[in-house]
Image (cartoon, rainbow, N blue to C red):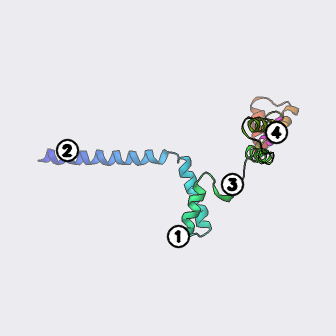
Amino acid sequence: MFRAIVAIAAAFGFALGATAQEKDKSKDKQPTAQQERMKSCNAQASKKELKGDERKAFMSNCLSAKGGDDKELTAQQKKMKSCNAQASKKELKGDDRKKFMSQCLKADAGDGRELTAQQEKMKSCNTQANRRELKGEKRREFISDCLSA
């Protein structure tokens, strides 16, 4: 009888340990992109104090690919929109439209694409580090400080 109680207690202890480990594992997992988007949209809806159908509509729009009116178009998306409008204005169809769109999207590309603000800052910091002829760890420290300034 004593052995049976000890065995049950041991099994119960192992079960609790396994449950605790599973909880620890779930804490280590990073949220998916969809979960992050849901969290962000939820926070925005709460900030706007939306309720009921208004909240549902907002959440639906926010979670969709459109993303609501809070998101701006990227430089590439703006260019695509502009080229598309030009092609429509010229009433281009089929192969002519494809050729026009290809040329329009390549135009003004320079070395490929526009730099983001972070890339501009990195370029500036690199230039400054080059002027100072910094190498190795000193260069990394300088770049790090420069980027965080």
Q: What amino acid does circle 1 point to?
A: Gly
**Helix, strand or loop status at disc 3:** loop
- x%, y% of residue 15? 30, 46
Q: CA distance from mark 3 to mark 4?
A: 29 Å
| Residue assigned mark 2 | 7
Say which residue label 3 marks.
Answer: 71
Query: How would you rate the neighbour count of disc 2 (Cα within 10 Å): few for under 14, some for 14-19, many for 20 or more?
Result: few
Camera-near label (1 vs 2) is 1
**Who comes first in sequence, dot 3 or dot 4?**
3
Magenta stretch, residue numbers: 119-126
- Label 1: how many Cα within 10 Å (few below 14, some 14–19, many 20+): few
> Mark 2 and mark 1 in contact (Cβ < 8 Å)?
no
The image shows residue 139 at horizontal and vertical percentages of 78, 33
- Contact between marks 3 and 4 (CB within 8 A): the answer is no
Question: Element type at marker 1?
Answer: helix
Local SS, label 4: helix
Label 4 Cα neighbours within 10 Å, binned few <14 / some 14-19 / many ≥20: some
| Spot occupied by residue 3 in the image (x, y as percentages of width and height) | 15, 44
Q: Is residue 58 magenta?
A: no
Eyeballing the image, is 137 above or below 79? above
Answer with the quarter of the image where residue 147 lies.
top right
Give the mark nearer the N terminus: 1 vs 2.
2
Q: Residue at x 24, y 45 (%)?
A: 11
The amino acid type of the residue labelled 2 equals Ala
Indicate the position of residue 48 as horizontal and vertical percent values: 62, 68
Does residue 46 appear to the left or right of 99 in the view shown?
left
Location of mark 1 (residue): 52
In the image, residue 60 above or below residue 85 = below
Mark closest to the chain's N terminus, 3 or 1: 1
> What's the residue at 77%, 36% (across, down)?
96
Q: CA distance from mark 2 to mark 4?
A: 66 Å
For residue 66, side relative to residue 126 (left or right): left
